[in-house]
Image (cartoon, rainbow, N blue to C red):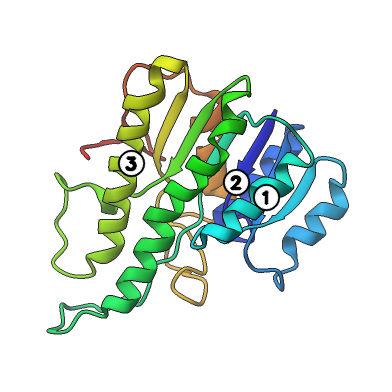
Amino acid sequence: MNVLISGADRGLGLSLTAKMLARGYTVFAGQYLSEWDELSLLCQKFPNTLHLIPLDVGCDESVKNACVEVEKITSKLDVIIGNAAIIGWIDDVMTDVTDTEMMAEVYNVNAIGNVRLFEYFLPLLKKGHEKKICFISSEAGSIGECERKSFFWYGMTKSAVNYYAKVMYNRHRTDNFKFRLYHPGWIQTYMKGPIDEYADLTPDEAAVFAMDYFFDQIINEDQLILQGYDGKIFEF
């Protein structure tokens, strides 16, 4: 099975990459942080099945170039996991002035980044066996269950991801594509800077739940849902 994953340098993306490799999958790992060496170390363990692909989902040219690099190795992909995301600066309270430049950057990576990833790589996915599109979303993107009074732009980006997932589902489900829209939980990652030690899950723990949902669970493919790591279904 050929899998492409964005944001594979660390956190959930790195743990998912390691677990997919352990299953014998061929993984094309989107690498944004070339100076971060954990992917390179993993490549030493899986030299034949792990391919490091420079990938910045926030840049059209980078995604185009990544597609070219993948096509040099394979003519098809079975699964694409849109994992890359940033969170921006968090304030505990709503301020009078929103940092719109930062908001635009977060939106570009989290929302438009998924559009770039899936639109450019769709021809390879069409040739695959599984034809599975996996979105890492968040409960923060649920409008119906929103209780936040501040820090809205991250949630807005995930709402946009949910909407795009629904459009893709409407467009491609009749072509036997499969879709996974997923909230991975609160994970101990570097998204806020230092590792968030108060989060509920380690990346490896979160990856176990994600692997089960993406690859093992029997899903009603004729219904798109936003499911959490604990099985909760979110309104979106």
- Residue 203 seen in the current view: no
Foreground mark, 3 or 2, reads 3
The kind of residue tagged 3 is Tyr
Q: How many marks?
A: 3
Residue 50, image x, y percentages? 78, 45
Residue position for label 2? 5
Whether residue 226 is situated above or below residue 36 in the rendered picture: above
Q: Residue at x 35, y 16 (%)?
A: 222
Whether residue 95 is situated above or below residue 204 in the rendered picture: below
The kind of residue tagged 1 is Ala
- Mark 2 → mark 1, Cα distance in angstroms: 5 Å
Residue 133, image x, y percentages? 49, 33
The kind of residue tagged 2 is Ile
- Out of 99 and 37, give the one closest to the viewer: 99
Residue position for label 3? 164
Quarter of the rendering occupied by the N terminus:
top right
Q: Residue at x 73, y 48 (%)?
A: 69
Q: Residue at x 52, y 62 (%)?
A: 59
**Which label belongs to residue 29?**
1
**Position of 127 compared to 196: left or right?**
right
Q: Secondary structure at mark 3?
A: helix
Residue 29, image x, y percentages? 67, 50
Q: Residue at x 41, y 24 (%)?
A: 172
Q: Secondary structure at mark 1?
A: strand
Whether residue 97 is situated above or below residue 40 in the rendered picture: below
- Out of 72 and 111, give the one closest to the viewer: 72
Whether residue 146 is situated above or below residue 183 in the rendered picture: below
- Out of 79 and 64, give the one closest to the viewer: 64
- Marks 3 & 2, CB-CB < 8 Å contact: no
Alpha-carbon neighbours of circle 2 within 10 Å: few (<14), some, or many (≥20)? many
**Position of 201 compared to 41: left or right?**
left
